[in-house]
Image (cartoon, coloured by chain):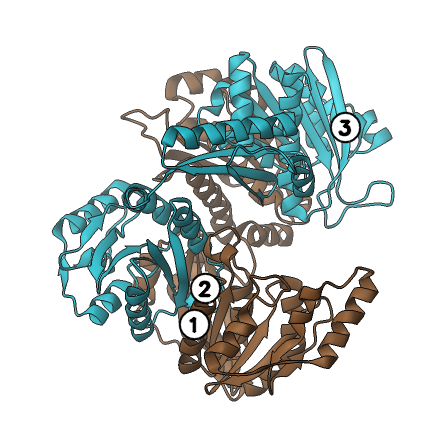
Chain colours: A brown, B cyan
Amino acid sequence: MKIEIITTGDEVMQGVIVDTNTPWIAERCHMFGHEVVRHQAVADDAAAIGEALVAASKNADAVVVTGGLGPTADDITVEAAAGAFGAKLVMHEEVLEEIRRFFERVGRPMSRSNEKQALVPEGAEVLPNRVGTAPGIKVKFGGAWFFFLPGVPRELYQIFDDSVAPWLKEGAAQAISERVLRCFGLPEASVDEKLSGVDLSGARLSFRVKFPEVILKVVARDADPAKARQSTTLAAGAIREKLGVAIYGEGETSLAEALGAMLVERKMTLAVAESCTGGELASRITDVAGASAWFDRGAVTYSNRSKMEMLSVPEDVLRAHGAVSEETAIAMAEGLKKSSGASIAVAITGIAGPGGGSPEKPVGTVFAALAAEGGVRAHERHISRDRVGFKQFVAWTALDLVRRHLLGA
Amino acid sequence: MKIEIITTGDEVMQGVIVDTNTPWIAERCHMFGHEVVRHQAVADDAAAIGEALVAASKNADAVVVTGGLGPTADDITVEAAAGAFGAKLVMHEEVLEEIRRFFERVGRPMSRSNEKQALVPEGAEVLPNRVGTAPGIKVKFGGAWFFFLPGVPRELYQIFDDSVAPWLKEGAAQAISERVLRCFGLPEASVDEKLSGVDLSGARLSFRVKFPEVILKVVARDADPAKARQSTTLAAGAIREKLGVAIYGEGETSLAEALGAMLVERKMTLAVAESCTGGELASRITDVAGASAWFDRGAVTYSNRSKMEMLSVPEDVLRAHGAVSEETAIAMAEGLKKSSGASIAVAITGIAGPGGGSPEKPVGTVFAALAAEGGVRAHERHISRDRVGFKQFVAWTALDLVRRHLLGA
């Protein structure tokens, strides 16, 4: 089925509130195998609402409309819909009784304006609201099924799950299989290039940047669920083959989480020393529940003195090569490895900007070093990002350095 | 002016991502006194995009379109627009050169697919993108002005602020004055209560939660810019009087930035010791450009051994009171103050969850301690948030503890 979603409300139009109802509905429609063909949002204006509804009835098989079912004067969705399609509004006695009972239950007086909420288009089906006063309404207008639902999220969710979702499920012709792969270290354009022409076994690939990573999704539909699943399995395999080690995980896993699982498996621990990332690396690590099993400590050494005191970086290394240098990064990692006793110590030093750059070491320069049983490795990178983006990207780079080390990559 | 906003992208249609660009744009259009008459969102489908654009050109004076300007095969907005309005696409040599230079600057090879981003409708004006490759495009189609902008938020924001906002401002009939006040430590409902009935001198107040803070905005419009400014000045003063020390700053200032300015003024430095916040506190501090002037170091001490080794916490304190205790928080702050020589040391220990709680010390328990010249102070809090929200809130609480200490509050 083709589905359109319409939101009404001045607050949405003026950007006062972010409309999270529409993505919530869209995700469910998509999950049931339907195609969401358009969203529209319009102000609390009868003409604008009517126009949007009529356009939707020509564009889609089903239309989900949220907002404007409340008791106040600017709640006009049902009236506008009846006007646009020439339908008559009738007082629904059972709904009126429900609303009366609702107010008795919560011990508040029912206002006259609540009676309006019992007006429904003639011939419409009423969808019960167990958590508020406005019921949902299901009605066929101009060849499309319309579902009118309240804009209050918890009321919307309840009515949708109870009364709309089963209808959508029934109407779904095909099963859907979906796989999400997470990729770090390759820019979007390179991912695109590497995957051009790859055989996806009938699945559909989409990807998006969620800085600093790229998230790939393969979706397959088939009347036979096993076939849909087989398509995504084959497609995911083909993608992994092309992108190799750049795919760090699947589903909702974060890079730090994937790394943590590898360390736990190997019974290893990690310590980090940060200059330019200033705690960002440690914080991404400690976002992972249970990180204490594999994360020992972090040192945020912003001053030269703290590098000497906390990490035993020799003063002459700092003097000879500067705080931002491969030599200092190595000394930081080695010092921390020794003092912490962790299996692996990783260290970062660089220039996050906007100040502090020089012709030899411009803003964006970063050195990372990793000290482990087998010795030390280091690399230099140049990251062109604002301060906060630089910190995020470099923190991920450090996590990835450890991950690749464990993989022998 | 009547304005319509259009978003393109399969991921929006499928509910994979919440479209926060549209409310961001809508808020600005509304602020400049224009009426946003409709939002539309459509999939990456040339026919659907074309139809939406044509409908918008009949409905509005200006149309802001986001998404689909990237280098990949599913980025088709400009092509679809040219098709819908019968415009010719031409290679814009300067833009192509800009894209080449961008890749040189970031030291990555330019892919062939990036060339597509230099194709613009004949006669269009190019709006520079300083942070990415896809430029914005301004062009008149079917009687309406169209602004095509990238969907990547930081690119969108930059191009909009540089090239669209001035155009919208010019088209506005009235002068607008705006003041933004930032508040931490009071829940939204308390802010609402404290401000009910306050005289806003004709300005309009709105506020929203941007976790963990509450952001208040006062806006006044007047044909006379001085009068508009006077309204917001008086309103901001009245709000500050009611909320007092909970207002930590104005405009784009962060809490860490406000604190940094206070420390610099007093020629003081700060060191932090974190257990449960795991680097989040240090990372928010080091987000501030120039933080090295007042931030000395941070210790992320996840293990007991690291608390003893990095902060000289006595083993018997840990044994007698546990790692999550007021006594340990105080020992952490005092140990760090002594070893770092910073003017102020602040320490955090607590239980972020989801595991690790007990009946006496449930998940969400946190102890903070501050050691300074005059001695040490500590407090206990209970924060009911998920792990990441807990870390963020507690980090802000620690910054606020230092700020209030400096204010003698």
Q: Which residue is mark 3?
A: B379
- Give the residue type that dot 1 points to: Ala
Q: Secondary structure at mark 1?
A: helix
Q: CA distance from mark 3 to mark 1?
A: 55 Å
- The residue located at (39%, 30%) in the rendering is A351
Q: CA distance from mark 3 to mark 2?
A: 49 Å
State the image quarter where residue B295 is shown.
Answer: top right
Q: Are marks 1 and 2 in contact (CB under 8 Å)?
A: yes
One can see residue A377 in this view:
no
Which one is in front, A296 or A93? A93
Residue B189 x %, y %: 68, 43
- The residue located at (52%, 55%) in the rendering is A11
Locate residue B49 relative to residue A28 in the image: left or right.
Answer: left
Chain that bears disc 3: B
Q: Secondary structure at mark 2?
A: strand
Q: Which residue is mark 2?
A: A42
Q: Secondary structure at mark 3?
A: strand
Residue positioned most to the front: A112
State the image quarter where residue A37 is shown.
Answer: bottom left
- Give the residue type that dot 2 points to: Val
Chain that bears disc 1: A
Foreground tag (3 vs 2): 2
Up-down relation of residue A263 to residue A385 (above or below)? below
One can see residue A320 in this view:
yes
